[in-house]
Image (spheres, coloured by chain):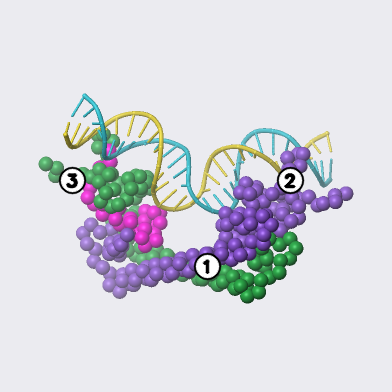
Chain colours: A green, B purple, C yellow, D cyan
Amino acid sequence: MAIAVQLKIGDVAKQTGVAVGALRYYESLGLLNSKRGDNGYRYYSPEAVHQVQFIKKAQALGFSLEDIGEVLTVHQRGNVPCEFVQSLLQDKIRQLEIQIQQMTAFKADLEIYRDRWAESQPRPQPGDICPLIETVSLTA
Amino acid sequence: MAIAVQLKIGDVAKQTGVAVGALRYYESLGLLNSKRGDNGYRYYSPEAVHQVQFIKKAQALGFSLEDIGEVLTVHQRGNVPCEFVQSLLQDKIRQLEIQIQQMTAFKADLEIYRDRWAESQPRPQPGDICPLIETVSLTA
DNA sequence: CTAAACCTTCCAGCCAACTGTAGAGTCAAC
DNA sequence: GTTGACTCTACAGTTGGCTGGAAGGTTTAG
């Protein structure tokens, strides 16, 4: 008659869809705790499943494991870390904006190069490898 | 009286702004050739500078060193590899489009989460870590 | 002639988030 | 009691494009 259900790492893995190795990795980063049995096995409470699901969700929101570690630290200090999550979220949104901008600009550049070639094939200069690329000017 | 100017690796590095180690790395990937002197030194013709600049430009267009290797291989077979570059370029553009789309959708998701919290802070359920994240539903 | 500045090879490390393997111990079913 | 499924640790490997260091040989400026 087990009063508290104790899960082994494989159980947590099955219930969360996260590989056993990944769970051990999370533990090594301080994201997940376990109690050790006399046999050296890790044992988990059902809340661990919840915590792993939290990690997955936060990852799905683009947070790195380091970010998540900070969130969990705030949580473990007894706070509801939502304000902190808010600011991380805002950072991510800003970063995404910048990346999208850069990628869009970059895509436009590529299209210019593509079209330049499609319209009028630049004449190869002696020594050129591919005139299409040779005409690229490097700013950086 | 040197009839053909022979550059040492440091000269090529200075003229291109590419680190010596990177040049050796390019050579290890087959992107750059050199002749060896009796002292074991790599010697380069001035065209090598051109070739390194080509590599930099292609990189600036988002090509991987592997891509560039293929382009140079086509070139070394005696062809002007522009059609091949064209198709690579088209691939890159397509990939960028997809990435931009995904990132935009993802950013919209993040904004929804941010705004959901800003409007009405969800009540923490017992056992929750951060209710803002707990409400995330995982599709995958 | 000597010291600095080059050059060589080989190997390790970096970033993230794992996965895979070896070798050994443990547990559960039949 | 034995087979097979599970667990443990520890370390190597993955991806890409490098950088940095050790330990040695070469060249060049003064």
Q: Residues within 10 Å of mark 1 (few under 14, many from 20)?
A: many
Q: Please state the extent of the stretch shown in magenta in the rendering.
A: A41-70
Q: Residues within 10 Å of mark 2 (few under 14, many from 20)?
A: few
Chain bearing tag 2 is B
The quarter of the picture where residue A10 lies is top left
**Is residue A11 visible in the rendered structure shown here?**
yes
**Is residue A109 visible in the rendered structure shown here?**
no
Per the image, the residue denoted by label 2 is B35
Per the image, the residue denoted by label 3 is A5
Chain bearing tag 3 is A
SS at mark 3 in the image: loop
Per the image, the residue denoted by label 1 is B93
Q: Which amino acid does the dot numbered 1 rest on? A: Ile
Of A56 and B59, nearer the camera is B59
- Give the quadrant of the N terminus of chain A: top left
Q: Position of residue A42 (x, y in %)?
A: 28, 41
Residue shown at the point (33%, 56%) measured from the top left: A56
Q: Main secondary structure of the magenta part?
A: helix
| Residue at mark 3 to residue at mark 1: CA–CA distance | 53 Å
Q: Earlier in the sequence, mark 2 or mark 1?
A: 2
- In the displayed orientation, state which residue is furthest to the front: B78
Q: Position of residue B15 (x, y in %)?
A: 72, 57
Residue shown at the point (81%, 52%) measured from the top left: B5
The quarter of the picture where residue A88 lies is bottom left
